[in-house]
Amino acid sequence: MSAEKESGYKKNFSLIITFIAMMMVLFFLSLFLAYRFSTKFIENEFISEKVNVLEQSIKTYNDFFQKKLPEVSYYNGYLDSTTASNFADTLLIEYPFVSKVIFYDSEVRNTPVSDGLNTGKFSFGPKNIYQFGTSMPTDSVELFSKENTRNFIIGDDFNSLALKLATYIESLDTSKTPTQDQLFSNFSNVRSNKITYLNIPRLEDLKMYKRMIRKKMPSQPVYQQDMLSFYLDPYKIKIINSRPKLYEQVRIEPLTYDPLETGVNDVTTEITLPGPFSDYKLYFISSQSFIDKEVLNYFLPLAFGILSFFSIVVLVAYLIFRNLNINQKMFKLQYDFMNNLTHEFKTPVSVIKIAGNNIKSASSLTEKEQKMYGKILDEEADKLNGLMNKLLAFTQIENKVIELNRDLVNVFDFIESTIDSHCLKHPDFDFTYEVTGFNTFITDPVLLGSLFDNLAENAYKYSPLERKKLHISAKLIKGKVVLRFADQGIGIPASEIDNIFKKFFRIQNKYNQNGSVGLGLAFCKELVNFMEGEITVKSKVDIGTEFKIVLPYNEQ
């Protein structure tokens, strides 16, 4: 039997070690894969998130291009120097990347102009040209006028957009209404660091322009057109780093800019700016240690989730293992209980059977033999009856199907009767007792007797021959009845103290080899609980054990 237990233990132990090893391998593998995933994810984020930084940084430019520029058309060509100055001042304040504005106060004529574009009978030229900027000298605000050109060359900005206008008018289908996108693209010109914009005429004016190209009109009409060139400084774009934990530095550099001198461990990426800033790029630089911090920030929640998952798995495995152990122990306890119970029943039954057969086979019995067999039958029947009564009482108390009787008990008489009955059974049993503070109290005498009998029997059973002694004390302390049963027996190991009140539990020693159901102390605890009391124990091996019972004190 011990070999089987040892083999089973080894099997369980190896299974536990295997499970723990597998869980550790899976745990660290999961952490490794999670860290690899975090690293790849942050690397991809480093590449992809630059688009968000770009969008956030040029949001102000998009607002300028899509909303502010079209406002020029609201003036229908009638901007003057003062209004244009106010418009430019607003732009320079709201949009710091606008460094200078050139305003062309222009006219469309049916007669030739000396400065500007002449195609057919269609002419387009400036009356005055002004420039506005944050640090512009006062005397340089007006660059050109018909009376004073100041040797100013109108330049490609005006001429290229004027030619674009003439080309568009020649190809215009006057039977269709042009879309806003068509008008905007033909009345604006985007170059490096510069946007030139011409106010969009009404459709009736465009039709007239088309006629003016082909022939000279008798009325010689003149139309006002405003053109503005916006000079842009890409270095004044405010960089909005929406991922400061990902990008350590974000800079604006020309496309032809030589690669920065970065360290071996630096990570870089770049993206080109749109529209008039297309000759420039956003340049992103982060050191590897900086990236590693972000990888760690992303990895830690994953690691915590993995740890939580494996903790739950281990906890479930532990609970399953514990339940299996409990079931195994319960099976063993029940198995031992059935064996011991069978032994307890079998012994008196066998004795009764033998005595009955002897009586049956004997032709005649002497008076001495009759008394002997009668005593044997009576004692063995009492054993069977006592065992059955204990099992029945235990079940009834545990299921609370009996009621607690309340009778007045004289403590002196009760203890002396207990001593008498046990001394009659065990003449070598040495009893002493003391009662302090009270003489009587109200309780259930039957249950109290069972309690006394079980503890007295244990004291006798688990004591060596030379120390079969029991001292019972009964004291009234702070309104409670305190009973102490102190013996000089073999004692209880400290490791077993917490188990002795469990059903079917037996301490393995030489005194328990010949039958013990394991219900005695469990029955005592149920009795005390049923009587609304408490039971505790303290013990030292080879010195003795003391059971302390505290019961409620009732006088009436």
Image: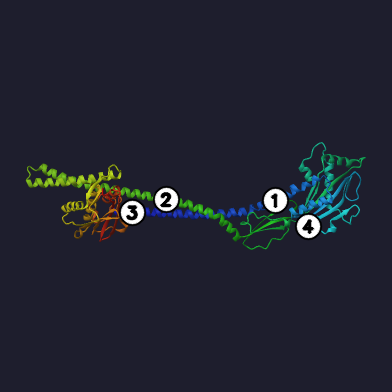
Coordinates of residue 205 in the picture (x, y in percent): 84, 41
Coordinates of residue 539 in the picture (x, y in percent): 28, 59
- Relative to residue 397, is residue 27 drawn left or right? right
In the rendering, which numbered label is found on residue 536? none
Three-letter code, disc 4: Thr
Disc 4 secondary structure class: loop
Coordinates of residue 22 in the picture (x, y in percent): 45, 53
In the rendering, which numbered label is found on residue 59? 1
Contact (Cβ within 8 Å) of mark 3 with mark 4: no
Q: Can residue 214 be seen in this view?
A: yes
Q: Which of marks 1 and 2 is in front?
A: 1
Contact (Cβ within 8 Å) of mark 3 with mark 2: no
Name the foreground residue: 45 vs 490.
490
* Mark 2, residue position: 317
- Relative to residue 1, is residue 209 drawn left or right? right
Disc 1 secondary structure class: helix
Q: How far apart are marks 2 and 4 (CA)?
A: 75 Å
Mark nearer the N terminus (3 vs 4): 3
Three-letter code, disc 1: Lys
* Mark 4, residue position: 134
Mark nearer the N terminus (4 vs 1): 1
Q: How far apart are marks 1 and 2 (CA)?
A: 56 Å
